[in-house]
Amino acid sequence: MAFWDEKSLEEMSPAEWEALCDGCGRCCLIKLEDEEAGLLITSDVHCKLLDGDTCACTDYPGRQKQVPDCIKLTPQNITEIKWIPTTCAYRRLAEGKGLAWWHPLVSGDPQTVVDVGVSVKGRTFSELDIAPDDWENHAVDWPEWEPPEEL
Ligand code: SF4
Ligand code: SF4
C-alpha cells in the first residue's frame, strides 16, 4: 500500500510530507480580501519567490524569512486554512479523499498536474511586476477549478 494511503498526515516522515506537494503553485498566489463580503479572492499574481514557469519556490528553505506571510503547512493547520485549494494534496488527504488520479505520485508524471489544468504554470504574474493598486484587476476564479475525480 502507498504511504499516503497507509499513514495519517501526522505519521508521515518529513520526506514523505514534502513528496505530497503536487507542485501546482496555487497556494503561492496572492489573495485579495473583499471586506464587505468577508471573502478572500484569489488573484493570478504570484508571490515574488515563485518561479512562474516551474511553479517552484526559489528559496524554499529560506522562504519564511523572506516572506513572513508564507504559511508552513502542518497536519494541524491544513484543515483550518480556508483558502488552501480543494485540489491541494494535503487538504485532500486531511479530508479523507486520497490523492487524485492526476497527482504525480499516482500518475508517475509531474506533467499531469499541468495537463489537467491544476498547475498555475505560465498563467500568472509576479507581484514584483504588478503594482499593488492593480491587484484587484487580477482577481480570477480559475485557481479554484477542480478536475473530475475520474479520467
Ligand atoms: S496547493 Fe498544496 S499541492 Fe499545490 S503547491 Fe500548494 S501545498 Fe503543494
Ligand atoms: S515563499 Fe515560496 S512557498 Fe511561500 S508563498 Fe512564496 S513562493 Fe510559495
Image: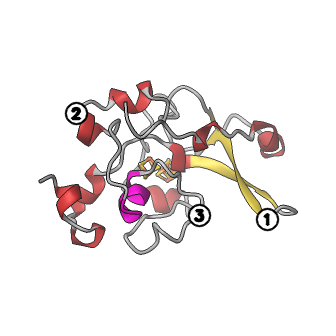
Is residue 46 visible in this depiction of the protein? yes
Point out residue 96 in the picture as x, y percentages from the top left corner. 36, 62
The mark found on residue 38 in the picture is 1
Judge the density around disc 1: few (<14), some (14-19), many (≥20) Cα neighbours within 10 Å.
few
Q: Which mark is residue 79?
A: none
Identify the magenta region: 89-96
* Magenta part, dominant SS: helix
Residue 127 visible in this rendered orientation of the protein: no
- 84 within the magenta span: no
**Quarter the C terminus occupies:** top left
Label 2–label 3 contact, CB within 8 A: no
Q: Report, in whole angstroms, how far the alpha carbon at label 1 lies from the one at label 2.
A: 39 Å
Against 133, is 9 above or below? below
> Which color scheme did the rendering employ for the protein?
secondary structure
Q: Which residue is mark 2?
A: 108
**Which residue occupies the extreme front position in the image?**
150
Residue type pointed to by label 3: Lys
Which residue type does callout 2 highlight? Gly
Left or right relative to 127: residue 59? left
Is 94 inside the magenta-drawn segment? yes
Q: Position of residue 94 (x, y in %)?
A: 38, 64
Image quarter in which the N terminus is found: bottom left
The answer to whether 9 is drawn above or below residue 128 in the figure is below
